[in-house]
Image: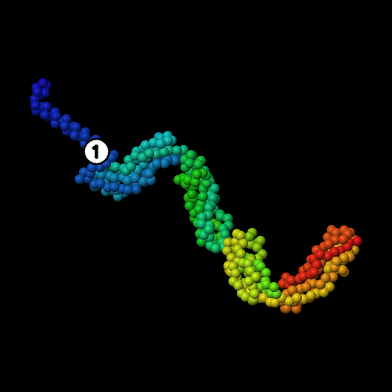
Amino acid sequence: MDKWLKSPWFVRGVALVLAILLYTAVSLDDNTTQSESTFIPNGSDEVETVEDVPVDIRIDEEKYVVSGVPNTVTVTVQGSKSVVTPTIRQKAFGVFVDLQDLETGTHQVKIQQTGISNELSVYIEPKTVEVTIEERSTQNFDVNVEFINQSKLADGYELGEAKVTPNQVTITSSKEIVDSIAIVKAFVDVSGANEPINNQGVPVKVYDNQGNELNVRVAQPTVEVSVDVRNPNKAIPVEPATKGELRDGLTIESMTVDPEEVRVFAADEILSELDQINTEEIDLSEITEAKTIQLGLQLPDNVRKMEPKKVEVTIEVGEKEEKVFESEQIETRNLDEDYSLTFVDPTDGLLDVTAIGTSEELQNLGPEDISLSIDLSGQGPGEYEIPINLSGPDNIELNVNVENAVVQLE
């Protein structure tokens, strides 16, 4: 033995053997590292890369939800062409993360593969991922419809109530996230809508109470929304509006509007309260002769649209004339049958009435068209000064020389 140790050839042989063993060990370690980290391809090997390989999550999905696992990864394989080619072509392999023995919380886990021959070196990118495991929670939530671009509805239209099918959706996520859900919405764009919306598919959006959209699993990610789009309207008469006074000696013979009615678009409750639409005011102090004026209309509150927006008003002007009706009797109204009445002023209750209008208007005016009266409601015995009520055709101006009648009740 001592002779061997002293022999230089023996020492050289042992050194050679140790060098070979060391080289082999290093090569094996390099191959292992290479399969898990990166490739330094051997010139004689085939290398193939498959992108977007789905990642399977192995866990009890009835109890837990997982976040942090990528949907897909990239898988690269290296080895002899005879093994690589059928492996890639047949895609008879899978990628997964095994979380079955882990508790809730955050973990760093390795992405693993199955179905790839041991003859091949495999590299997965990413190699590891940080995942969070949480308890699963499932609840039903009402779906609220919100209209957007209502200001861009077609002119004159309004929205009725929305119908959602289904009106509830089932949402699954971690218990913490499900507990933070504040509202579930379906947004319907109604810009330009001029007919009912029927069964429009609308995606469901989920928000917390801060208005942040939540990334959760919705069993019904799309709902169908139907909305009644209505166009309530009504034909309403147009009435000329005036201000100021005609100059002395003139009177309005007629004032006609063309068209006589306009179509007004508004909510039903607004239309029910509208009985006329007024024109812009006509300044009578500027009217000295017959003329036709184009005028805009006074748009009432909450009216969405009006057609047409302008009308023509034709004004006929005539010279004023007077016609006197003598000794018109003042009628008594609501006189208690237990009392008798005596006129003190005017005597016998007779007054002259002066009517002012155009020649044509006065020609057709008779005493029967004029009414003088006093109201004696609630009056007992005594002397009273009672206002005289004077009425006649709207286009005729009527005047008397006293405003009140003095009467005696007994």
Please name the residue shown 64% across and 76% down the image: 289
**Which quadrant holds the C terminus?**
bottom right
Q: At which x and y percent is residue 99?
A: 39, 37
Q: At which x and y percent is residue 8?
A: 9, 26
Above or below: residue 251 compared with residue 183: below
Q: At which x and y percent is residue 304?
A: 58, 61
From where the camera sits, is residue 232 visible?
no
Left or right of 329 on screen, residue 187: left
Please name the residue shown 53% across and 57% down the image: 150
Secondary structure beneath label 1: helix
Please name the residue shown 70% across and 77% down the image: 319
Left or right of 186 on screen, residue 342: right
Image-quadrant location for residue 313 = bottom right
Q: Is residue 241 or residue 283 the one in the foreground?
A: 283
Q: Amino acid at mark 1?
A: Asn
Please name the residue shown 49% across and 46% down the image: 211
Counting the numbered discs, the total is: 1
Above or below: residue 285 compared with residue 128: below
Q: Residues within 10 Å of mark 1 (few under 14, many from 20)?
A: some
Q: Is residue 1 or residue 247 the one in the foreground?
A: 247
